[in-house]
Image (cartoon, helix red, strand yellow):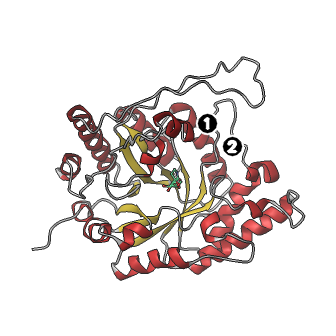
Amino acid sequence: GKVKGLKDYYKKYFPIGVAVNMAALHGPDSALIVQEFNSVTPENDMKMGPIHPEENRYNWKNADEIVSFAEQHHIKVRGHNLLWHAQAPAWMFKDSAGNQVSKEVLLQRLHDHIQTVVKHYKGKIYAWDVVNEAIDDDSTKFLRNSMWYKICGEDFIPKAFEYAHEADPSAKLFYNDYNSEHPGKRERIYKLLKQLVDAHVPIDGVGLQAHWKLNDPSPELLRKALDEYSSLGLKIQITELDITVRAPIPWPRRNPNAVQTQPAAMPAPVAVPDSGYTATMEQKQVAQYKMVFDIFREYKKVITGVTFWNVSDRYSWLDARGGGLAGGAAATQAVGRTVRKAYPLLFDENRQRKKAYYAVVDF
Ligand code: XIL
């Protein structure tokens, strides 16, 4: 008979998705995607910058290809995303003279963008990440000080959901963020979601990105997050799951109270060699994957999808960040030209099932 894939093991639970790009669709990953997954998310191709590079030009090519690949293989599509502070095109916030646009103009542009994109894929995308990462990481702040916030204040968030709902009333609409299980961030996300729900904004759920580590989140914090968010009547999707085997790169912190010169001098990064994928890492990763999937199944009434961020350990977006989550460009600089991979997925560099794969389908 047919070999069972992840999607078959999880048939009674939720769709199992994966982030895809052109390389995945056109290379050997494509057979694996069809075999294992029944949902896809474009890794970059539907983001505002890539899909709407100039005011009067949309670039549908890649995103359309992903959607038709999915249709051809009876795979669902999650749209990602309609509004984010990153990968937003510079023209969006400027007028033809190069001055910052008014709130009125920006909301009009946001309206046009969301309506155009959501209508283009109407009926073909079952869930959209409408607003991505709007909450600040700083516990003393609430919304991130993005261009959206600077120009519009808090209004851009409910507006984005209303525009999307108007364009495709059947699509499920999500707020998506990372570190959503960390107590402080969780409370701030909860506060935003509660505001939206209380104001009858058309929001269906919350996306937990789930860029996780070997010991983070704990089962207690994961359960707590699922309980809190679902108590608002919202559904939950795990939208960008990966579990890096890397501890954050040690990056000497500046004294936050010191008077900074402009630009502030950064301390020298600590060089971190690649230690490969050790047996200890593997063992911890297997345990963490098993733990989180045990909990996902327990919460099958509220979890309506689980998506991995990339296909196999051959390529993960984390590799470009030194395998780690903290630091970004700084982390890349810290590892210099050394490859320091994250090994964060269920398939190895040769696209073979890892021990973690067997741990999540054995129930
Ligand atoms: C990442 C992509 O994987 C990279 O290819 C790109 O360079 C940057 O964005 N949170 C998100 C995703 O919501 O869109 C990000 O994807 C990963 C973090």
Q: Position of residue 307 (x, y in %)?
A: 39, 57
Label 2 belongs to which residue?
Answer: 144
Front in this rendered view, residue 235 or 260: 260
Residue type at the position of mark 1: Asp
CA separation in Å, label 1 and label 2? 8 Å
Q: Secondary structure at mark 2?
A: loop
Front in this rendered view, residue 217 or 18: 18
Q: Position of residue 54 (x, y in %)?
A: 72, 71
Residue 153 is marked as none
Q: Is residue 265 above or below residue 28?
A: above
Residue 137 is marked as 1
Q: Residue furthest left?
A: 1
Q: Splitting the image into 4 quarters, where does residue 215 fall?
A: top left
Q: Secondary structure at mark 1?
A: loop
- Looking at marks 1 and 2 on the same chain, the residue that comes earlier in the sequence is marked by 1
Q: Which residue is drawn at the image coordinates 27% and 53% (left, top)?
A: 349
Q: Which residue is drawn at the image coordinates 24% and 38% (left, top)?
A: 282
Residue type at the position of mark 2: Arg
Q: Splitting the image into 4 quarters, where does residue 10 fall?
A: bottom left
Q: Position of residue 124 (x, y in %)?
A: 48, 78
Q: Using residue 170 as the reference point, say whether residue 12 is left or right of it.
A: left
Q: Position of residue 166 (x, y in %)?
A: 66, 73
Q: Splitting the image into 4 quarters, where does residue 97 fall?
A: bottom right
* Callout 1 touching callout 2 (CB < 8 Å): yes
Q: Using residue 116 as the reference point, say whether residue 34 is left or right of it.
A: left
Quarter placement of the N terminus: bottom left
Q: Which residue is drawn at the image coordinates 31% and 33% (left, top)?
A: 275
Q: Is residue 51 above or below residue 106?
A: below
